[in-house]
Image: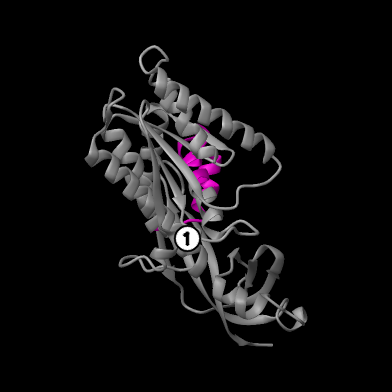
């Protein structure tokens, strides 16, 4: 509903009451209705996925429309970002290449088009009214936050983002900003309570960050050390026999097998184990490479 209201606001900015009295009246009336509903439902969270993307700049031709090749690619890349995030949240790990798992479960519908600052509204196809936020809604929140974080002037949040995404997701983010930058386009993203306008400086900054960052993952040889777990945060620390410590998140498979319903932590925590981990190295210009680890499996207890 908030996405539809934003679409109407954008549309009304592109026309005046003198130019189109009937259209202006209809859109204003509908916008007032939506605002009234939003005020009434202010305390009720939006439970399904919905986002509006408003484009401006060279690809937009006045109030008539937007270049079809640009709009099609922009929406396609955005859907690709959502699909990769959804698959990663559900499955934990994805292959570097190939089809995206669970693609059909993350598809959004194009439900509305707005002129003026040309925009599209994408919504989740949901037959029944959910009682809680859908998984796709949660994923879309993360995607919009990721786009915002990549474009922010302060890079601290982007550094934190890199700890939670994989290389395929990073590449798709880069493709989105590259398309906008090369097309001399800007975008406004409205999703729930998030409403962010990205100008050309923001977009170029995000493009440089995403294109110059590399994420490489490799499965390490089995490691031996004393294991400590933070079940609530799904993180681990392993004190290696040589005294060095490594830490990071645990995989979804590990959490299911060992953290959920953990009855006797003393059987695992503080014990010496041979474990399987995945090393993840993030490389950025003018910075030291940063390596973190993910705990994949317990191989054998050694004490």
Residue positioned 46% across, 49% down in the render: 123
Can residue 21 be seen here? The reply is: yes
Q: Quadrant of the N terminus?
A: top right
Name the secondary structure under disc 1: helix
Can residue 241 be seen here? The reply is: no
Magenta part of the chain? 144-167
Residue sticking out furthest to the top: 18
Is 166 within the magenta?
yes
Instruction: Check the image and tell me how it is coloured.
Output: one colour
The crowding category of the residue bearing disc 1, from other C-alpha atoms within 10 Å (few below 14, some 14 to 19, many at least 20), is many
Place residue 243 in its image quadrant.
bottom right
Front-most of residues 21 and 139: 21
Q: Can you say whether 99 is above or below 161 in the image?
A: below
Is 193 within the magenta?
no
Place residue 106 in its image quadrant.
bottom left
Q: Can you say whether 297 is above or below 33 in the image?
A: below
**What secondary structure predominates along the stretch shown in magenta?**
helix
Q: What residue would you read off at disc 1?
A: 86
Residue 55 x %, y % = 36, 32
Left or right of residue 64: residue 18: right
Left or right of residue 140: residue 259: right
Residue 145 x %, y % = 52, 44
Residue 130 x %, y % = 60, 59
Left or right of residue 287: residue 72: left
Left or right of residue 228: residue 103: left
Q: Can you say whether 161 is above or below 94 in the image?
A: above
């Amino acid at each position: 509903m908030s996405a539809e209201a934003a679409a109407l606001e954008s549309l009304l900015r592109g026309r005046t009451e003198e130019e189109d009295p009937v259209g202006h009246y209809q859109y204003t009336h509908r916008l007032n209705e939506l605002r009234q509903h939003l005020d009434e439902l202010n305390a009720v969270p939006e439970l399904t996925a919905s986002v509006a993307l408003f484009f401006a700049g060279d690809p937009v031709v006045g109030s008539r429309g937007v270049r079809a090749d640009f709009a099609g690619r922009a929406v396609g890349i955005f859907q690709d970002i959502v699909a990769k995030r959804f698959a990663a949240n559900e499955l934990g790990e994805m292959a570097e290449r190939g089809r995206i798992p669970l693609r059909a479960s993350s598809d959004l519908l194009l439900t509305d088009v707005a002129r003026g600052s040309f925009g599209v509204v994408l919504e989740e196809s949901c037959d029944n009214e959910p009682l809680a936020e859908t998984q796709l809604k949660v994923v879309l929140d993360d995607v919009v936050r990721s786009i915002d974080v990549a474009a922010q002037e302060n890079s601290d949040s982007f550094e934190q983002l890199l700890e939670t995404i994989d290389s395929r997701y990073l590449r798709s983010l880069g493709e989105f900003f590259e398309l906008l930058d090369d097309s001399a386009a800007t975008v406004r993203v409205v999703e729930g309570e998030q409403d962010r306008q990205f100008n050309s400086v923001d977009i170029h900054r995000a493009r440089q960050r995403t294109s110059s960052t590399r994420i490489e993952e490799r499965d390490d040889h089995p490691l031996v050390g004393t294991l400590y777990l933070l079940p609530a945060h799904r993180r681990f620390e392993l004190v290696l026999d040589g005294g060095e410590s490594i830490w990071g998140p645990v995989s979804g498979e590990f959490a299911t097998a060992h953290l959920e319903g953990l009855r006797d932590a003393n059987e695992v925590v503080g014990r010496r184990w041979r474990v399987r981990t995945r090393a993840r190295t993030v490389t950025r210009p003018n910075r030291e490479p940063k390596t973190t680890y993910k705990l994949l499996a317990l191989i054998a207890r050694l004490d």
